[in-house]
């Protein structure tokens, strides 16, 4: 069978089928990148000698992460579970691809260059819409969009063809018998109801109070939770960027010199408001031109004739150098309201000038504010550097921190209780712009008492600080944290009691007592769910838990622990079987779903069979897993 498949690519029929399904395979199995790197990185995956290095693997994972980010909002946060799931998925892709590549080598499956070219050339996605011929530019744009090189795409096509020969064709066609479809449908539509009891720590009552001995023991056992960190008091001088710029601002002479050297750059070129309709065929474009010349509104013509840019048939107000070369010259030679038909690349465009804004020479006085802002922005780096140097020189020369503040006309402020790793409470108003970072904390904790720091550049300006006092880390008095200790004890006590109650209910129910009686004895209510299918839920149970419940036998008791140490004790109550006869349409839908699921499993099994006997090694640590 395999030897026949290995020769199948020589037949014209197979070439035709392969070319036709190539793009659908891409959408079915996904587009993945392959790097032919000479990197000497350590191996992450080794499938019988086909190795994937750490740099290759990291590239694949990052590509998937970038794709995920592009599909989500800016505030989306990637969790560790999500990252691990993506990493596992990429590992499986690489192993499957390597098994397929090794199998191709084993059976001498080879695809000639001319055959691969024919597959690519025959894909309609890469054809010029005007003549139907393969267009290299469209092909390159596609590769750029999906982040593939030509060699990578060719390798992908080869692998997809091999997958069709070695896997897909082996398991198709596969027909699901009607009896199986009916059984699946009945199982999917079977409904069950359940009896359940909820045990939550929030509802548990504690019958006693914490003792003094327990308070002392908590204080001793959890002393790290109560430790007050080291804090420091400091005098701080903050010099905002705008203050620095004023002191080192561009002089009138510098502004005048800049204008003389760059005078032409400030002149405003002629601009035009340009209307534009884009068409892929000349005949429609010519019709559009004729209707505009006849007096019909430009926007109306664009919409009626379905121009490519019908929703916004304008280029706006543009200068000549903002237009493509094919468009720029003719557009700026046209008169107002005298539309023309232009060929631009592979399109035909109707272009009309709505208004002309003449060029203007700007005077020195008109552009002076712009030059000052430009020079000041350019000079900010130099100004900050010079200011820091002047401050450090002054401090090294014996000047006080207050003297530094006076150099720039700002106030020195006192900041108390600065922690090392958290925001400063009650930060003075003059320093509010520093509240969102720990830069000030880091600076203060880098110096000893009475030492004046070097001038440090922050995002908003320059900061200089002098530590005036240090309070070492220490434990507070027990009385000061007793309230916190009671809160901690209460939470743990309720959690323990809830667990004890839940375990007791399960034990009593498993010993033959009715769940309702067991719950009532503990002043708890027993609930009964509505009959549900496998795709529905109750009491916030997860799909996995619902599946587990549908497999439970009558009388069996299940317990599930949820967030917040709450417990759900459940037992099956009633089963409602689906006995209706399926109509042909529904039966066909069930068959298709079953076939798709079975086909996926069989393809996976076929690939697993090829992998039998191969030596597959995965370094999970290098793949990024801590365990």
Image (cartoon, rainbow, N blue to C red):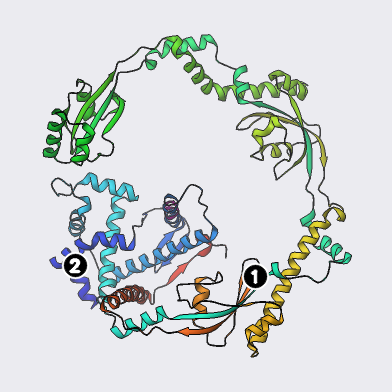
Q: Quadrant of the C terminus?
A: bottom right
Q: CA distance from mark 2 to mark 1?
A: 61 Å
Disc 1: CA contacts within 10 A as few (<14), some (14-19) or many (>=20): some
Note whether 321 is above or below 57 in the view shown. Answer: above
The image quarter in which residue 410 lies: top right
Q: Horizontal placement of 280 versus 585: left or right?
A: left
Q: Quadrant of the N terminus?
A: bottom left
Q: Secondary structure at mark 1?
A: strand
The residue beneath circle 1 is: 566
Q: Position of residue 82 (x, y in %)?
A: 50, 60
Q: Earlier in the sequence, mark 2 or mark 1?
A: 2
Taking the spot 38% from the left edge, 17% from the top edge, the residue there is 265
At horizontal 68% and vertical 81% (from top left) the residue drawn is 520
Measured as percent of width and height from the top left, residue 541 is found at: 54, 71
- Residue at coordinates 70% horizontally, 31% vertically from top-left? 429
Judged from this view, the residue extending furthest toward the bottom is 512
Which residue in the structure is indicated by mark 2?
9
Q: Residues within 10 Å of mark 2 (few under 14, many from 20)?
A: many
* Residue toward you, 475 or 577: 577
Residue 583: which quarter of the image?
bottom left
Question: Would residue 11 be seen by someone viewing this image from the given angle?
Answer: no
* Residue farthest along the right direction in this orientation: 212
Towards the viewer: 502 or 323: 502
- The residue shown at (57%, 88%) is 555
Q: From which residue to which does the magenta span run? A: 62-66
Task: Work out whether 355 lies above or below 428.
Answer: above
């Amino acid at each position: 069978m395999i030897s026949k498949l290995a020769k199948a690519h020589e037949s014209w029929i197979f070439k035709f089928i392969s070319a036709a399904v190539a793009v659908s395979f891409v959408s079915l199995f996904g587009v993945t990148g392959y790097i032919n790197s000479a990197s000497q990185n350590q191996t992450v995956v080794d499938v019988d000698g086909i190795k994937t290095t750490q740099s290759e693997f990291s590239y694949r994972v990052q590509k998937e992460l970038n794709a995920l980010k592009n599909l989500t909002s800016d505030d989306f946060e990637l969790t560790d579970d999500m990252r691990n799931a993506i990493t596992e998925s990429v590992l499986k892709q690489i192993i499957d691809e390597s098994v397929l590549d090794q199998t191709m080598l084993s059976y001498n499956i080879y695809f000639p260059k001319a055959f691969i070219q024919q597959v690519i050339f025959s894909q309609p996605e890469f054809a010029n819409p005007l003549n139907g011929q393969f267009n290299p530019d469209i092909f390159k744009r596609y590769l750029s969009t999906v982040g593939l090189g030509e060699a990578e795409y060719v390798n992908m096509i080869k692998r997809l063809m091999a997958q069709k020969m070695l896997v897909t064709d082996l398991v198709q066609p596969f027909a699901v018998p009607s009896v199986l479809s009916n059984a699946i449908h009945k199982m999917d539509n079977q409904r069950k109801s359940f009896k359940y009891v909820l045990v939550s720590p929030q509802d548990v009552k504690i019958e006693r109070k914490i003792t003094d001995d327990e308070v002392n023991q908590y204080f001793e056992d959890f002393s790290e939770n109560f430790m007050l960190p080291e804090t420091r008091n400091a005098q701080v001088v903050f010099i905002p960027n705008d203050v620095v710029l004023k002191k080192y601002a561009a002089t009138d002479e510098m502004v005048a010199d800049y204008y003389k050297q760059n005078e032409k750059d400030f002149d405003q070129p002629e601009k035009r408001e340009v209307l534009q309709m884009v068409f892929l065929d000349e005949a429609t474009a010519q019709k559009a031109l004729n209707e505009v010349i006849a007096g019909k509104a430009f926007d109306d013509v664009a919409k009626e004739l379905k121009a490519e840019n019908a929703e916004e048939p304008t280029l706006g107000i543009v200068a000549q150098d903002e237009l493509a070369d094919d468009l720029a010259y003719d557009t700026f030679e046209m008169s107002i309201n005298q539309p023309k038909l232009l060929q631009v690349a592979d399109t035909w465009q109707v272009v009309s000038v709505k208004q002309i804004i003449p060029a203007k020479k700007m005077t020195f006085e008109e552009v002076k504010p712009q030059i000052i802002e430009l020079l000041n922005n350019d000079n900010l780096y130099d100004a900050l550097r010079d200011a820091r140097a002047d401050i450090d020189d002054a401090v090294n020369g014996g000047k006080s921190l207050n003297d530094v503040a006076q150099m720039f006309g700002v106030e020195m402020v006192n900041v108390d209780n600065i922690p090392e790793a958290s925001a400063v409470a009650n930060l003075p108003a003059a320093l509010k712009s520093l509240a969102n970072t720990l830069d000030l904390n880091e600076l203060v904790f880098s110096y000893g008492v009475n030492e004046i720091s070097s001038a440090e550049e922050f995002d908003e300006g320059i900061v200089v600080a002098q530590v005036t006092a240090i309070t070492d880390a220490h434990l507070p008095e027990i009385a000061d944290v007793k309230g916190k200790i009671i809160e901690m004890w209460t939470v743990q006590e309720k959690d323990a009691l809830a667990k004890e109650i839940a375990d007791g209910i399960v034990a009593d129910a498993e010993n033959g007592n009715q769940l309702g009686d067991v719950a009532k004895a503990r002043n708890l209510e027993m609930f009964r769910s509505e009959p549900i299918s496998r795709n529905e839920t109750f009491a916030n149970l997860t799909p996995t838990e619902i599946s587990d419940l549908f497999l439970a036998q009558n009388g069996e008791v299940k317990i599930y622990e949820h967030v917040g140490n709450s417990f759900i004790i459940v037992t099956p109550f009633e089963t409602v079987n689906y006995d209706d006869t399926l109509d042909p349409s529904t039966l066909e839908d069930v068959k298709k779903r079953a076939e798709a699921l079975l086909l996926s499993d069989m393809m996976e099994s076929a690939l697993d069979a090829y992998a039998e006997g191969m030596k597959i090694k995965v370094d999970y640590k290098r793949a990024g897993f801590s365990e």
